[in-house]
Amino acid sequence: MISDPLVRADIETLLLAGQAMDFASRLKGFNRITNPELVKNFARLAGTSERQLYQDVLPVLKRSDVIDYAVDVHGQLEYVEELVGVTGSIIAQTFKVLDGLDPNDHEIALLHSIEIAAWAPLTRSQHIDQISARTGVGDEAAERGYNLALAIGINQRISSRELNEEVVFNPHVWGTGQVQIATFLRNLPPSERDALLGICEAVTAKPGSTLNAIGGDSRVVTGARKVGLIQAATVKSNALGRPLSQTYVFSPLIQTEDDHATTTEALHLRKLFLAHILFGQEKATLGYGRIGNPVVLVEKLLKRKEVGPATNIGTDYHMLEAAGVVRVEGDPGERAYLKLIKEDIVRDGLDWLKASLGSVTGGSSELTRLQNVPGRFVTPERDRTTIPDDAASEEIMTSTILELRKEAQRAVRYQSPFGR
């Protein structure tokens, strides 16, 4: 809750956009409402006065195709009908509402500051430079937006003696390692740093993208995986006697200090679930129940508590079953059912799945005759430890070794900075 009156005044447009969408979402499921008092009460629940409702909220929501409404000759409401999620995604509708309210430069800078801090921890100067470069606002507006993101408590900063500067990050995404990653990014050439932040943006927008799909310089991507800037999870199988694998990429999520083990386990299970659903869409055996529409399948699993029968279910999901996320009823090679066990993991995984739509292309022709599917899952933490410190990745990271490990001698000898 933002209580500082000065801060609230500075982000008035953002707050109004939030109130407008809050009001619209409260109408969802009520179809057409013809009772004006009911509409006013919904507005009150969203913190919107009657005057603000008529003057600002209703008009901008109608212009943005989020609601439809009409008034009589006396200016009283005849009806209100919500269109939340109908004319576009809720996020797209929210930004359309915000755009219709004409936010000022520092409010735009604030939104980008929050987004950039979620992509990666950066030094203060580089963070503000990224705001200016991505928004086109002036330095003053960029710095004001940066300060507002701190004032409302979404972004945080810590001082670094090694960098002699503050490091800015989103604590809801980056629980640890902020200085290490900021050091890694600061020492990259500007073009490579911008490219890497673009990769972070893509991974945040589409969790579960394939490693090949995100593109970029392989050396930079390998270095980013090594320091934990992006996380990679790999599903492996040994179909037809030859190894096959697919690597999916995620943005790191916070692993809180309280209830750390439970949080970490839940994150691993969610990545495990998403990776296997995408693997089942891309590489499962054709004609035996390859997943055509992952979102529809998962929604059906949540609604009916089971999906099937299909032959691939009996062979593709034994690791999910071992993790207690689902249960497979049926024998390998026969048509089997997939039963839901951990609904929270699957429901959260569905959100990631929807965000990743379009991030995984169809499987190649070489992979359409698989007899065996996922045999092993490599977690992001294990992925980091198994990346070799070869000459290519070492070349990129040499300039960061002093700060990362404080061992100049190891950097000079080109030894691994991650050996201990």
Image (spheres, rainbow, N blue to C red):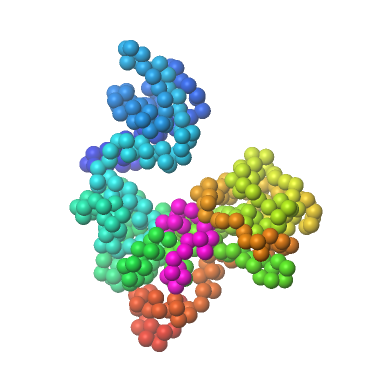
Outermost residue on the left side: it is: 140
Q: Is residue 174 visible?
A: no
Percent across and percent down for residue 170 are 37, 55
Percent across and percent down for residue 400 are 36, 75
Percent across and percent down for residue 231 are 49, 63
Q: Residue at x 34, y 41 (%)?
A: 1
Q: Up-down: is 7 above or below 278? A: above
Residue 177, image quadrant: bottom left
Residue stretch in magenta: 200-221
Q: Which is nearer the eye, 347 or 139?
A: 139
Q: Up-down: is 23 above or below 76? A: below
What's the magenta bit mostly, secondary-structure-wise?
Answer: helix
Percent across and percent down for residue 327 are 71, 51
Q: Residue at x 65, y 59 (%)?
A: 283
Q: Residue at x 74, y 53 (%)?
A: 288
Outermost residue on the top side: it is: 73
In the visual, does 154 lie left or right of 310? left
Q: Is residue 218 visible?
A: yes
In the visual, does 138 lie left or right of 78? left
